[in-house]
Amino acid sequence: MTSSINGRKPSDIFKAQTLLYKHLFAFIDSMCLKWTVEMNIPNIIHDHGQPISLSNLVSILHVPSSKAGNVQRLMRYLAHNGFFEIVTNREMENEEEAYALTVASELLVKESDLCLAAMVECILDPTLSGSYHELKKWIYEEDLTLFGVTLGSGFWDFLDKNPDYNRSFNEAMASDSKMINLALRDCDFVFEELESIVDVGGGTGTTAKIICETFPKLKCVVFDRPQVVENLSDTNNLSYVGGDMFSSIPNADAVLLKWILHNWTDKDCIRILKKCKEAVTSDGKRGKVIVIDMVINEKKDEKNLTQMKLLMDVNMACLNGKERKEEEWKKLFEEAGFQDYKISPLTGFLSLIEIYP
């Protein structure tokens, strides 16, 4: 049986409606994630030492009894999405359901070695997330980024003018760096035989500290905006330098660009890469540039991974940046004067690219 709507089957129309509604209400996914961080639920379960019952959780949260059912519904949905596991506590008379952490919610336990709660708090701040209501207005503005439309300035200028949000952003980037550090521990081949490295846009030095600990003979410089590094202290083989990567980058055997180039247009990336090339070819040396970023590969990646990368590409478009395919990366490297490159897998969605002058 077919419908009268473009000859579509009712089953196909209903399936399309489900897809539409899934994305229509997708913002609730983010808000539920924000809620669990704000309520500190991952820490509560972690500190409890075992799965926690709904009644116990509600008691700890001091939630009115009239809202206990709503807590249960939120937890059920978060569990369905993989953030908690629902188990049955058979020691209780009514075999009450209890909630246990999963790998995803373990990443939200504050003060843990690998914690992304700061990323949730930063990205879902209404100042940032609210800007996405203005996509229509932004798409008609020839020169402005989305944040230029909504905040009255570029994102980086906004950070400079808002210390509290700048601090939140730096904490978020530091938390993400810890995830990358986990992958870098198995990348000895990247850093062996290097005597010096500059981490451009290295923030407060989260990644640089791991590199220094792993390779104590390697001299590491964290290079970032002056206001980011001005109050940070040097150590034996780690130092901080403030400056502008578009003007010059300290000389070294290697330059690290960790999740930097996706923030910028092709034209700006070429400018940055040319400065990197100058830094690693000083005094006749032929060092390398190490890029950690996404490589879109729709033909080889599974659908969910491609969806994540394309989602990030839309996100970066709002900053006038982009996620790139290998052929797009290659074009940038060649236009910046590099001769060769090698791509290696790093994390689930990030790759490590070594570029040679």
Image (cartoon, rainbow, N blue to C red):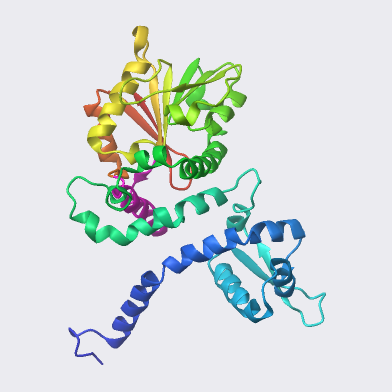
Q: Residue furthest bottom?
A: 1
Residue drawn 54% across and 48% down?
A: 118
Which quadrant of the structure image shows residue 70?
bottom right
The image quadrant that residue 280 belongs to is top left
Residue at screen point 35% across, 39% down: 157
> How far from the left and from the top, in percent, is residue 24?
36, 71
- For the C terminus, give its image quadrant: top left
- Residue 66 at what x, y percent from top left? 65, 81
- Reply above or below: 269 against 135: above
Magenta region: 293-319
When asked about the image quadrant of residue 52, the answer is bottom right
Residue 295 seen by the camera: yes
> Could you say where residue 164 lies in the image, as x and y percent from the top left?
49, 44
State the image coordinates of residue 119 (x, y, percent, origin top left): 51, 49
Check the image and report above or below for 321 versus 353. below
Residue 30 in magenta stretch: no
